[in-house]
Image (cartoon, coloured by chain):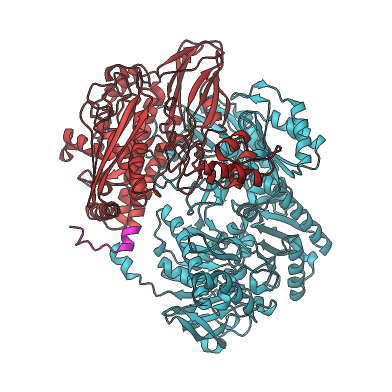
């Protein structure tokens, strides 16, 4: 049945569509609630979705992060190439962590479960989760090839007609530092798909659906049409922008070139840096994920994210470019570069859509992996994520200490400390780190940590923006740079695992977002509020905003401010 | 409630605008309804006035009342409208921003314009103390007592009224919080202090701190009010038990409510949902969408199989498009519903983009809508309803309150019609429409987020403003049917009188299932059950009517979320392990389809719910009024002009007297049905009938056939 023939009235469609989203949300919730790691259950570093028989993603859970969601959207075709749908049986479950075919590094396992309605496949449930450990060097930037980054599981059956592949599980258990949570989370991934599958069959029975395809066609076709309409509203043209990341040994250039014609877009990343010798390379699947994500945010945030919304957008990068890394390039910390891509896209679109983009923000989430030895000489390792500030919006301040473009969450200090010997001594906003502007950039945060006990520990900090600050838009100022310092007075100047003696305190200062619009146009009352709340210092209020606040930080010196600002406007 | 002679029972609901009363006299088998304006400066005054009036009218003396169950939206409104105490927060050094940094997460992945909720305490009033407890409960650094004393001085000097203390790992070791609480009590005795380990002893500093702050933010308001209420009721001669409705659907003592008002956050609305469920049970409509619109807010709640849904993760005051994640997190068991700032008192205005906005700010009871003549100048939903003819200026609250249409017109003209360049009537309809759309959208989101089709749920409408708006809201939702109970203006109070006395107890004791000291666990259960039994007995519940339900929060070792598993009564021991493990896996598989590979199960908390019997409330007796007519024409008491959007003009329609409409009366819309506490507006193309409980049932004209074919 084609979309035109379907008898779905708009309201039935809306209800069924939302029900499908409720189904995948339940899938994600089950996955998070049964998880054995804070990466999944607190941070939500996962994606979950449902696919039709042809492999089209129809709906995704609200929870999740673009690098997983959009990468997962395309992965199912790879699974079906290895295990065609007609060879699958009830109880089969497929798995892989192939970076090129899924979300770009070995730490992400993708699990796909065909759901059978009788003897026929109704659809597929898939999810991608970041596992606590995958062996190798551990999560980091230091590897010279993917082979050093851990265990590589090609597309394989995890369950065969309901029978667990215990040989594979033994192999995984023997190769990772923390087998229990790793296998526990794979279990959670399987259970999440099961829950989704059960709810899907209930839903299909309730609405009398014999197959998902008519609904899928309708959803995809409407999404595609809406996305095309949104693109068509933009004037035809070529939009370009370049941003820089610290890189590993040297800065990485990321160059976006967007060609917009009619109701389609072509994004080419040619001109970006070549592959790095270290693990910051990005596979094309992941480049595609963050490119389409940024375009959707700017052009059509309300359009549902599915196969249809991807169709009018074409993403490319030359093979061997850092954004189209080829096997066996190391890719462990691909998110660092990947999270810079929306900044390049927004920068390119800013000329055409100045009121639909946010200024540059902290970009990548900082992934902090701390490891050490237990008293019984075993290894402990703990990973958590944290966010700097987002860029300011055309009509609102940036959001402080909140991830963008990543969709993950932080982890409560109490949870971190309950599950590891890490002690967090401080986690607070970083004053003056938000770029000045009519709308201020989001503030970064400061985290100060140590490790209990008298053993040394190591830190693999996946950080950036220590050299290239988040730029403001429309005359807004830049956000503060990030840095990592130790109690020994050392400042970390590059990525890579570092070892510290017992008792060392490490202070992470996460970057702030850029401002939007000229700072001298910011409402002095807003500046006063920031000063009273110690988000902006009195000195910075004067220096950056031209606002003079009295000694007790109680009120604005209106005349002094006007004189100060007039002087700047005239200058 | 007890085997002794049944006493008079009273339900009292204090809303942001109105105070509703229901007096049930089991001997005479009669209900008496009261409704009066909430007195915001001292809400107990309205209770006493309303109660005195209602009891007098019923010919009852206050001392015949055995029990009063009371609920209030004061807590929610104080938070949404930011009208709580001037509050400070004390945290562990380095963590004053935990309450604002939150989860570092955008609740909407694609909308870059989203907004985050603003904490109740601004950063400058979030103060840090040098002290530190570690995750295992050990002390890394003792409390700097001198610092606390300095802070106490500063708080007093700044005029702070309430202080939340939320220290890192206090859920594990409460010593430091208690030490600070004691220091503050000694050196700044005027401050109201809540500590996180008492309010919600759960891990995760953001949610715990947010809940503790919200608790203490409203505590002075609630404690003062409950003290005044107890005293005033005592002075009236009431010497029965006063219980307070909790958000979970159970009731608690005044003392508990005064210390932990956050547990009341949704208590009025919870009672409304319970009442809807009760009607559903009586009329075999086990699935309903309960829609409750009062003076300040509107609430929608899905009732499935006769029970409202509950949740322990609640958010109050969502700031961005009703989106989940845009409110302040509250850890408390609540009946799950959606609530938005849309009520009769909601203020209409033109925003900076030139668009008509209604709410969430409310004129409340004072100054009130412009038409109240109480000094309110802003146009409100009630003003619009009056201009549209939906309210009778001479019959508001049965004529006990006079409404003036001219100030209403003037307010709408000045603030809405002129800026938009439209007529006052069109502006009033615009206000009516915008608030209806807001409410229908919220209800739709609530239903759809739970995978429910809003079109399949009959709308059960009540609250003072509910019946005025329900017909249009049901139309927007395409609901097949609208049901409006008798006494719709005070329906929540029915819920108070049908809620069983229920007390929740929890004790934390961590251990692996196969390595627990079961004697200790038995002791914990016995102590909780003893406590519950004493409270229930003191409330007049007979020993044999008391029910105890034990449960435990269990999970696989290494997980972060628990499932609730029932634990048998009696002595526990080694024999409990296998049975509990099996019960855990049963629940786990039901929720998650398969067991986890690890086999170790751990327990975190142990719970007891002590309940009395569900009180019987013979609702059919509500129908015991005089002069009922099965012939609707006999119930017409007049006619008046109301605005009908289909014609774009005022049209004259019949006005039915609610109290004269007997069972099986039928008529067609458009029409007005008036009772003292609320007015029902029925539009065109609607068939109206009255059922055996005297509820008005309206077929909205939304065709059910479209849905049947799609299913």
What stretch of residues is rendered in magenta? A3-14
* Image location of residue A277, percent across then percent down: 29, 18
- Image spot of residue B695 (x, y percent): 53, 74
As drawn, is A9 to the left or to the right of A417? left
| Residue placed most toward the observer, B369 or B468 | B369
Find residue A473 and report its horizontal and vertical position in percent: 43, 41
Q: Residue at x 15, y 40 (%)?
A: A86
Quarter of the view holding residue A61 = top left
State the hue of chain A.
red
Residue that lies at the very extreme toward the front in this rendered image: A570
Q: Is residue A6 magenta?
A: yes
Which quarter of the figure is the N terminus of chain A placed in? bottom left
Asked whether B392 falls inside the magenta stretch, the response is no
Q: Is residue B631 visible?
A: no
Chain letter tied to cyan: B
Compare residues A336 and B551 and report the one nearer the observer.
A336
Residue drawn at 38 percent across, 34 percent down = A188
- Residue B241 position, x and y percent, is 75, 56
In the rendered image, which quarter is residue B107 located in? top left
Q: How many marks?
A: 0
Judged left or right of residue A384, residue A87 is: left
Could you tell whether B589 is left or right of B162 in the image? left
- In the rendered image, is residue A518 in sight? yes
């Amino acid at each position: 049945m084609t979309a035109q023939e379907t008898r779905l009235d708009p309201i039935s469609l809306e209800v069924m569509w939302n029900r499908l989203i409720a189904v995948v949300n339940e899938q994600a919730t089950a996955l998070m609630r049964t998880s054995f790691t804070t990466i999944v259950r607190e941070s939500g570093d996962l994606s979950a979705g449902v696919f039709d028989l042809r492999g089209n993603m129809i709906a995704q859970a609200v929870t999740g992060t673009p690098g997983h969601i959009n990468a997962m959207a395309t992965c199912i075709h790879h699974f079906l190439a290895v295990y065609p749908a007609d060879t699958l049986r009830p109880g089969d479950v497929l798995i892989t962590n192939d970076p090129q075919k899924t979300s770009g590094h070995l730490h992400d396992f993708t699990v796909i479960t065909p759901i059978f309605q009788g003897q026929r496949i109704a659809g597929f449930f898939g999810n991608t989760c970041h596992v606590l450990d995958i062996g190798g060097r551990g999560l980091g930037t230091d590897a010279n090839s993917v082979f050093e980054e851990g265990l590589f599981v090609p597309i394989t059956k995890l369950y065969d007609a309901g029978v667990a592949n215990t040989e594979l599980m033994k192999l995984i258990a023997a190769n990772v530092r923390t087998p229990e949570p790793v296998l526990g989370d794979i279990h959670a991934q399987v259970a999440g798909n099961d829950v989704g599958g059960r709810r899907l069959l209930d839903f299909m029975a309730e609405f009398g659906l014999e197959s998902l395809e008519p609904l899928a066609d309708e959803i995809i076709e409407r999404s595609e049409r809406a996305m095309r309409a949104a693109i068509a509203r933009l004037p035809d043209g070529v939009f370009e922008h370049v941003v820089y990341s610290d890189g590993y040994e040297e800065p990485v250039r990321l160059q976006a070139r967007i060609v917009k014609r009619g109701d389609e877009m072509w994004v080419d990343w040619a001109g970006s840096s070549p592959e790095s010798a270290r693990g910051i390379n990005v596979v094309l699947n992941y480049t595609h994920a963050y490119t389409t994500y940024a375009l959707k945010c700017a052009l059509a945030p309300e359009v549902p994210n599915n196969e249809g919304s991807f169709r009018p957008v074409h993403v490319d990068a030359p093979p061997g470019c850092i954004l189209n890394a080829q096997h066996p390039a190391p890719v462990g910390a691909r998110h660092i570069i990947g999270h810079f891509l929306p900044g390049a896209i927004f920068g390119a679109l800013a000329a055409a859509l100045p009121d639909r983009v946010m200024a540059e923000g902290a970009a990548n989430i900082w992934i902090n992996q701390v490891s050490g030895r237990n008293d019984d000489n075993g290894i402990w390792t703990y990973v958590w994520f944290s966010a700097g500030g987002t860029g300011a919006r055309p009509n609102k301040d940036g959001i402080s200490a909140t991830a963008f473009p990543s969709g993950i969450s932080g982890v409560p200090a109490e949870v971190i400390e309950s599950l590891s010997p890490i002690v967090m001594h401080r986690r607070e906003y970083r004053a003056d780190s938000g770029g000045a502007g009519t709308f201020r950039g989001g503030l970064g945060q400061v985290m100060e940590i140590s490790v209990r006990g008298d053993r040394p520990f190591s830190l693999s900090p996946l950080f950036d923006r220590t050299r290239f600050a988040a730029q403001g838009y429309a005359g807004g100022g830049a956000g503060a740079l990030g840095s990592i310092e130790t109690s020994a007075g050392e400042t970390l100047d590059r990525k890579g695992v570092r070892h510290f003696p017992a008792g060392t305190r490490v202070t992470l200062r996460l970057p702030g977002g850029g401002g939007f619009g000229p700072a001298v146009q910011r409402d002095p009352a807003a500046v006063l509020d920031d000063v009273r709340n110690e988000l902006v210092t009195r000195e910075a209020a004067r220096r950056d905003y031209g606002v003079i606040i009295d000694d007790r930080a109680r009120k604005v010196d209106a005349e002094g401010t006007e004189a100060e600002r007039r002087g700047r406007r005239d200058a | 409630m007890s085997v002794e002679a049944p006493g008079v029972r009273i339900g009292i609901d204090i809303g942001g605008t109105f105070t509703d009363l229901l007096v049930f006299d089991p001997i005479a088998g009669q209900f008496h309804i009261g409704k009066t304006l909430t007195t915001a400066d001292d809400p107990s005054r309205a209770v006493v006035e309303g109660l005195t009036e209602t009891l007098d009218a019923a010919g009852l003396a206050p001392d015949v009342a055995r029990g009063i169950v009371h609920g209030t939206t004061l807590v929610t409104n104080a938070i949404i409208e930011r009208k709580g105490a001037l509050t400070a927060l004390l945290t562990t050094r380095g963590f004053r921003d935990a309450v604002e940094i939150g989860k570092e997460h955008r609740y909407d992945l694609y909308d870059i314009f989203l907004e985050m909720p603003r904490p109740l305490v601004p950063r400058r009033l979030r103060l840090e103390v040098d002290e530190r407890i570690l995750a295992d409960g050990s002390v890394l650094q003792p409390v700097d007592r001198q610092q606390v004393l300095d802070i106490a001085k500063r708080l007093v000097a700044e005029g702070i009224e309430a202080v939340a203390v939320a220290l890192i790992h206090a859920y594990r070791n409460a010593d430091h919080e208690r030490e600070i609480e004691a220091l503050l009590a000694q050196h700044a005795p005027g401050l109201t202090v809540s500590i996180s380990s008492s309010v919600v002893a759960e891990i995760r500093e953001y949610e715990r701190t947010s809940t503790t702050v919200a608790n203490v933010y409203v505590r002075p308001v609630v404690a003062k009010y409950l003290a005044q209420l107890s005293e005033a009721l005592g002075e009236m001669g009431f010497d029965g038990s006063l219980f307070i409705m909790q958000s979970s659907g159970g009731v608690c003592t005044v003392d508990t409510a005064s210390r932990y008002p956050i547990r009341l956050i949704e208590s009025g609305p919870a009672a409304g949902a319970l009442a809807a469920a009760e009607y559903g049970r009586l009329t075999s409509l086990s699935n309903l969408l309960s829609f409750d619109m009062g003076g300040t807010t509107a609430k929608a709640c899905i009732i499935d199989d006769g029970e409202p849904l509950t949740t322990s993760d609640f958010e109050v005051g969502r700031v961005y498009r009703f989106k989940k994640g845009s409110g302040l997190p509250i850890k408390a068991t609540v009946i799950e519903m959606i609530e938005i700032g849309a009520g009769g008192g909601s203020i209409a205005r033109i925003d900076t983009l030139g668009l008509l906005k209604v709410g969430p700010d409310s004129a409340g009871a004072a100054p009130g809508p412009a038409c109240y003549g109480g000094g309110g100048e802003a146009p409100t939903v009630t003003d619009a309803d009056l201009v549209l003819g939906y309210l009778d200026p001479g019959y508001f609250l049965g004529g006990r309150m006079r409404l003036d249409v001219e100030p209403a017109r003037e307010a709408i003209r000045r603030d809405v019609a002129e800026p938009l360049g439209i007529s006052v009537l069109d502006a009033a309809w615009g206000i009516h429409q915008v608030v209806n759309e807001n409410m229908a959208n919220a209800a739709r989101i609530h239903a759809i987020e739970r995978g429910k089709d809003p079109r399949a749920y009959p709308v059960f409408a009540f609250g003072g403003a509910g019946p005025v708006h329900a017909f249009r809201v049901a139309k927007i939702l395409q609901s097949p049917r609208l049901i409006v109970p008798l006494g719709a203006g005070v329906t929540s109070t029915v819920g108070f009188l049908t809620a069983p006395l229920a007390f929740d107890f929890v004790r934390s004791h961590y251990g692996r299932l196969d390595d627990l000291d079961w004697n200790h666990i038995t002791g914990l259960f016995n102590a909780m059950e003893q406590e519950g039994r004493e409270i229930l007995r003191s409330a007049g519940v007979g020993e044999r009517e008391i029910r105890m339900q034990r449960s435990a929060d269990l999970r696989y070792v290494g997980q972060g979320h628990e499932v609730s598993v029932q634990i048998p009564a009696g002595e526990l021991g080694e024999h409990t392990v296998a049975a509990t493990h099996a019960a855990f896996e049963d629940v786990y598989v039901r929720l998650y389809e398969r067991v986890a590979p690890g086999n170790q199960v751990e327990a975190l908390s142990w719970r007891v719910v002590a309940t009395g019997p569900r009180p019987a409330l013979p609702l059919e007796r509500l129908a015991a009024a005089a002069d009922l007519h099965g012939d609707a024409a006999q119930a017409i008491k007049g006619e008046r002009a109301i605005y009908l959007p289909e014609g774009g003009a005022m049209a004259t329609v019949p006005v039915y007297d609610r109290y004269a409409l007997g069972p099986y009366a039928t008529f067609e819309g458009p029409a007005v049905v008036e009772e003292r506490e609320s007015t029902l507006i029925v539009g065109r193309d609607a068939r109206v009938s009255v059922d055996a409980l005297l509820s008005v049932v309206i077929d909205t004209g939304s065709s059910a056939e479209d849905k049947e074919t799609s299913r």
